[in-house]
Image: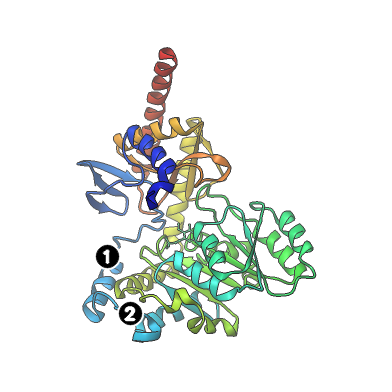
Amino acid sequence: MSLFDKYDQVAARHDRLVAAGRDPFNICMDRIVSATEAIVDGREVILVGTNNYLGLTFDQDCVDAAVAAVKREGTGTTGSRIANGTYSSHRALEQEIADFLGRRSALVFPTGYQANLGILAGLAGSKDVILLDADSHASIYDGCRLSGATLIRFRHNSPADLDKRLSRLKDKEGGKLVVVEGIYSMLGDQAPLDEFVDVKRRHGVELLVDEAHSLGVFGENGRGIAESAGVEEDVDYVVGTFSKSLGAVGGFGASDQPAFERLRYTSRPYMFTASSSPSSIATAMATLGKIKSGPHLRKQLWDNARMLYQGLTDLGFTICAETSPIVAVKMPGEAAAVFMWNALLEAGVYVNLALPPGTPDGSCLLRCSLSAAHTPAQVTKVCDVFDQCFQALRSWQDAQSAAE
Ligand code: PMP
C-alpha cells in the first residue's frame, strides 16, 4: 500500500486528459515575451489566462523598481519578520496599502493564499463561526479549516440564504464572520455586496471581502467591488493579492480595527514564514502607484473585456456572467472543453481549462482573463481563433458520432 494509492482515480483522470493532447496543468512557457505573449513549444501564443489585469508585469518603471530593490536589499529576506526583523520597505508598502484603501492598517503576506490563511486563522478561533460563500476560493476554505472555527457555507451569492443561516445562529456565542469575494475567479460573477451588507448589519456580524480579482479593476479609484458598490465602510476586513492587478507575488489583509495589528504576533501564517522578497514588495509598491495615478489602465482593460465578451457572444458562445475581465466560456462537456482548449493552444491562444470539481455547478469552462496590455488586434485574433476551433470541434464531434 503506497501513500500515493489514494490518488489513483485522480491520476487516471489526469492520464485521460493528457492523452487528449497536452497536459493542461503543466504547460511550460519556454519564453515570456511580454505581458500578453509567450513562446510555447516553439510557437507564439497570445496569453488570455494570466489574471495580469493591468498588464504591468513588463512596465518599465515597475521592472526598474524591482531591479533596484534587489540591488539595494538583496534577493531574499531569508526569514520571518518576527525572527529576522521587518524591512522598512515592507512597512512602507503596508502603509501605502492602508492609505490607498483608507484603512487604519494593513499586513503583507508572501502570497494571496497565505493572506487568506493568515487573516482567517488569525481572526477566528474554535468558539467562532465563519459563514462563507459556497463558491469561495480554496485559500478561504483552507483558512477557515486552519482557524478551527465552525464553518457554515451559504448558497453562492445568496444574501437570503446567509440571512436564514445567521438567524439560526442568533443565540450562539462567539464571533461571527461572513466571507465573500468581490469577483469570483472561475465565472467572473460579482457578489451583490450591498445586499450582503444589509444582512450583515441586521445581524450585527463582521464582513470580510476578498478583492483578489477586483482590486485595480473595479471602483472609481480601483479599490474594488466595495468601492464600486459604495459600501467600503461596512467591510470590516479586505483581503487582496499582488498576483493579479499588482503584477507581483504576495498578498495583504487590511482593516480599521485597532486590534488588527495583534495578528502580527498571533497569526501563524504571518509569523512562521519568510517575508516576501524585496523585488515583490518593490513591484507591488510601483504597480499600486500606477493604479493610483489614474483610470487609464482600468479603462483599457474594460474596453478589452467588452470587446472579447461581445465578440464571443456574437459568435454564439455562452459566457457565464455579465461583462468583466474574466470571460468564462461555457462548454457542453469535458471532452468538448478539452478538445477546444488543445485546439486553441495549437492555434496560438492560451486560456485556462477549468473543469469540475474546481468549477461551480460541474461546469466545463474555457476561462479567459483580459489585460489592459492586450491590443484590439489580439482580441480580434482570439475571437477568430475561437471561431476556427469551434468549427474544428464540430467536425471532430461529427466524425466521432459517425464512428459510433
Ligand atoms: N483569493 C482568490 C479569490 C483567488 O482567486 C486567489 C488566486 N487565484 C487567491 C486568493 C490566492 O492568491 P495568490 O495566487 O496570490 O496566492
Q: Is residue 194 left or right of residue 30?
A: right
Is there a contact, CB below 8 Å, between mark 2 and mark 1?
no
List the single residue furthest toward the top. Answer: 402
Q: Position of residue 139 (x, y in %)?
A: 49, 61
Q: Earlier in the sequence, mark 2 or mark 1?
A: 1
List the single residue furthest toward the front. Answer: 1
Q: Position of residue 8 (x, y in %)?
A: 41, 43
Question: Who's the residue at 30% across and 78% down the image?
Answer: 77
Residues 83 and 185: in front is 83
Q: Position of residue 208 (x, y in %)?
A: 60, 68
Q: Would the CB of label 1 be found within 8 Å of ligand 1?
A: no
Amino acid identity at mark 1: Gln
Residue at the disc numbered 1: 60
Q: Would the CB of label 2 be found within 8 Å of ligand 1?
A: no
Question: Who's the residue at 56% across and 45% down the image?
Answer: 360
Q: Give the alpha-carbon distance from disc 2 to disc 1, as whole Å.
A: 29 Å
Residue at the disc numbered 2: 79
Q: Is residue 87 visible from the viewing direction of this image? A: yes
Describe the element under mark 2 as helix, strand or loop.
loop
Q: Is residue 36 above or below residue 292?
A: above
Q: Is residue 386 above or below residue 223?
A: above
Q: Residues within 10 Å of mark 2 (few under 14, many from 20)?
A: some
Mark in the foreground, 2 or 1: 2
Q: Is residue 99 visible from the viewing direction of this image? A: no
Q: Position of residue 388 (x, y in %)?
A: 37, 28
Amino acid identity at mark 2: Gly
Describe the element under mark 1 as helix, strand or loop.
helix
Find residue 359 and name its label: none
Question: Colour mode?
Answer: rainbow
Question: Who's the residue at 32% across and 61% down the image?
Answer: 57
Q: Is residue 377 above or below residue 291?
A: above
